[in-house]
Amino acid sequence: MSKGLSKANHNKPTIGLAAGKESTFKVLGRGKVKFQADVNSTNRTITLDDVLYTPGLRSNLILVSKLVEKGVKVSFDNHEAFVKLADNTTIMMAKRSGRLYTVKTKCKPPMVLTTQTKHQAVTFDTWHQRLEHMVADTIHEMANKNLVDGLNITGELTMGGRCEDCIFGKHSTHPFNNSGYRETKVLERIHIDMWGPLPIQSAGGTFYFMLLMDGHLSYRTVAFLTSKSADTTLNVFKAYHTETERQTGKKLKHLRLDMGKEWHNKAWEQYRKDHGLVFEFTTPYTHQQNGTIERSIRTILDGARTALAELGLPMKYWADAIQVTIYVRNLVTSSQ
């Protein structure tokens, strides 16, 4: 019943005596309570005066002696209790539950009654929390320019430190450690990724390109595909595998791949077993773990778009632009 407390007098809290031995509770206010009592399926609006607001108590209690003082009659039996007026009209009914009687009420939509406290100044950090962790510079500007009534701040107009709740709630992901292993030999690790489908079919009739890059030399090889099926991508890799080992005299050892179905399938797994390769699959949706090839693809796409813009060529020549960009990149020095 405390949810319907209205016209409360919020004076200095007093102390009440609870039923337990040497136990007390705080009385934070005093006022009126309205609720709907269920009397034989009929709603009756009941108003109780001089109600104590005691949020520390687990239950809302009605004192029988207070009811009697108002001139009503209260009767009990083993199962129910009845509160009646002088004309014998029942205004409340209660059902026995253990050693208490619970008043039958009708549920109503929750009602929130607000009250306004004195305009007391609080710290900058408190206002930061009240304003849903708004950026500190915005609060500082509102306070300095008096843009908001009641924005009373005590102390410095700055945060007392970094807000841990903001750090936890606003960052998109934890930072990744950039200190990764750098390959020191040719074909020690090959990085592979797929891009597409592009919205425009290339002049050669393809929608995808598959990029393979040596981790040590940063030498890139590209294949343009009409689909990214397991058989298509595996045929490209088989040709690449044979050519690179034949031309370098080295043995390929590791492959860095994402969890795409074009590599994570039975056909690729069987090829791995047959040739003793090690597949290093990244965690799903964590492209940072495949950053080497991801950055390379971005560099290639930037170069291809720039070339098309400079020459004024239509987008259907995107594959040709990518091929030229990769050719040039393979001829220049790499940061690795």
Image (cartoon, grey):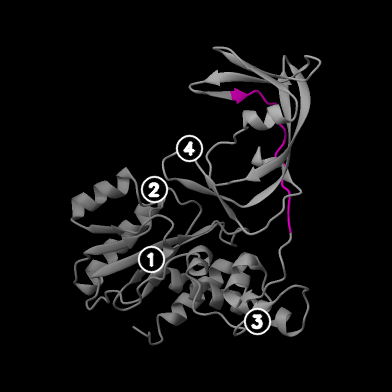
Mark 2 vs mark 3, CA separation in Å: 36 Å
Which of 131/228 is in front? 131
Mark 4 vs mark 1, CA separation in Å: 67 Å
The image quadrant where one finds the C terminus is: bottom left
Q: Nearer the viewer, mark 1 or mark 3?
A: 1
Q: Is residue 162 visible?
A: yes
- Relative to 55, 105 lies left or right: right
Which circle's residue, 4 or 1, is located before the other in the chain? 4
Pointer 2: residues within 10 angstroms few (<14), some, or many (20+)? some
Mark 2 vs mark 4, CA separation in Å: 75 Å
Three-letter amino acid code at the position of disc 2: Ala
Q: Which residue is mark 4?
A: 19
What SS does tag 4 mark?
loop
> Which disc number belongs to residue 310?
3
Q: Nearer the viewer, mark 3 or mark 4?
A: 4
Please say if 16 is above or below 91: below
Q: Nearer the viewer, mark 2 or mark 1?
A: 1
Which circle's residue, 2 or 4, is located before the other in the chain? 4
Q: Which residue is mark 2?
A: 230
Which circle's residue, 2 or 1, is located before the other in the chain? 2
Question: Which residues make up the magenta segment?
Answer: 102-115
Please say if 13 is above or below 89: below
